[in-house]
Image: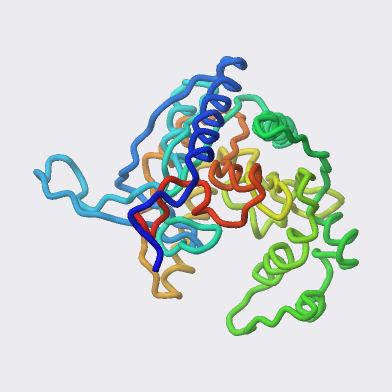
Amino acid sequence: MKDTSAPSAHFDTLRLRARLNATLRGFFAGRAVPEVETPMLSQAGNTDPNVASFSTVFSGHVSAGARTRWLRTSPEFPLKRLLAAGFGDCYELGRVFRDGEAGGRHNPEFTMLEWYRVGWDQFQLADETVALVQAALALVGRRAEVVQTTYRALYRDVLGLDPVTADDGHLQTALGDVRIDPEGLTRDDWLDLLMTHRLQPANPADRILVVHDYPASQCMLARVVERDGVPVAERFELYLGALELANGYHELADGAEQRGRFERDHAVRRARGSDLPAIDDALLAALDAGFPDCAGVALGVDRLMMAMLGTGRIADVVAFDFARA
């Protein structure tokens, strides 16, 4: 029986984590990007159907506002409100929370680094994200080769299929001996399964893979443009080895379009019988008031630590994992 009173990470790992935090802050200080702090408890939640939020109830006077408060799944919405108010480039390094995500690579509370660059696009921000990851790897005497590609090219080159034109049957066949219950799965689900089960495991441990231009159906909070006659989301994901580390966007600045996406999320949640977190009207008002052209990215710091040390267990890089908290 394991001793749940003992730390889950070695002391040397915790000291490395302290050096990593200092490196991250130094990276942005050297680029004149200020650190900010935003609320962990919000009146609005994350509507993404694939993300579950923790909520709590405020017991104080009703004049303080809504009693139900949501623990943030990222600092994205308040950071965007700062951008809309004219603050400019900024970053936040802090804890975020996601319900139901506990296991080898997941902890319900974890550390996220999120930052925004005004006047930048996804390609400029991807290059900066690569530089940051290389700076982190240098702490353990490593450096990675960098490969940048598009979502469509990656599937074509590695799997021999076109994710735009291949039918669902071909997507399922490409999974090979991976057996998944197809009940209720959408086309994007099959594409995601190919990414997690075929493409990510094939990425070498010392390679940073940056994938641009995701399907428009996976736009999240990114802008949608046409490339070669195909609508794509202006976003990127960065992988180090088999681990996804970062997800970035050329940010959507249209409040009406964003409201529509939130409402579509609610429709999916309603059909699944999931909670309906309140839509962030403050964010929508900020977008309507005038949002700057910018790009933003979120990076999982625990995942980065895992990749730096070559471990597949998040418990190895946090002082006390969820089972010991």
Determine whether 171 is above or below 137 in the image. Answer: below
Which residue appears at 70% of the width and 37% of the height?
Answer: 122
Residue 63 sits in which quadrant?
A: top left
Residue 261 in sight here: yes
Q: Is residue 241 left or right of residue 55?
A: right
Q: Is residue 15 left or right of residue 211?
A: left
Q: How is the image coloured?
A: rainbow
Badge count: 0
Determine whether 221 is above or below 143 in the image. Answer: below
Q: Is residue 224 left or right of residue 170?
A: left
Q: Is residue 158 left or right of residue 24?
A: right
Which residue appears at 81% of the width and 49% of the height?
Answer: 150
Q: Position of residue 43 (x, y in %)?
A: 30, 47
Residue 121 in sight here: no
Please state which of residues 171 and 204 is positioned toward the viewer in this rendering.
Answer: 204
Residue 297 sits in which quadrant?
A: top right
Which residue appears at 43% of the width and 32% of the height?
Answer: 81
Dividing the image into 4 quarters, which one contains the C terminus?
Answer: bottom left
Please state which of residues 170 and 304 is positioned toward the viewer in this rendering.
Answer: 304
Task: Please identify the residue farthest to the left as the structure is shown.
Answer: 61
Determine whether 70 is above or below 34 in the image. Answer: below
Q: Position of residue 171 (x, y in %)?
A: 78, 74
Q: Position of residue 152 (x, y in %)?
A: 82, 56
Q: Position of residue 92 (x, y in %)?
A: 47, 31
Which residue appears at 56% of the width and 27% of the height?
Answer: 24
Dividing the image into 4 quarters, which one contains the N terminus?
Answer: bottom left
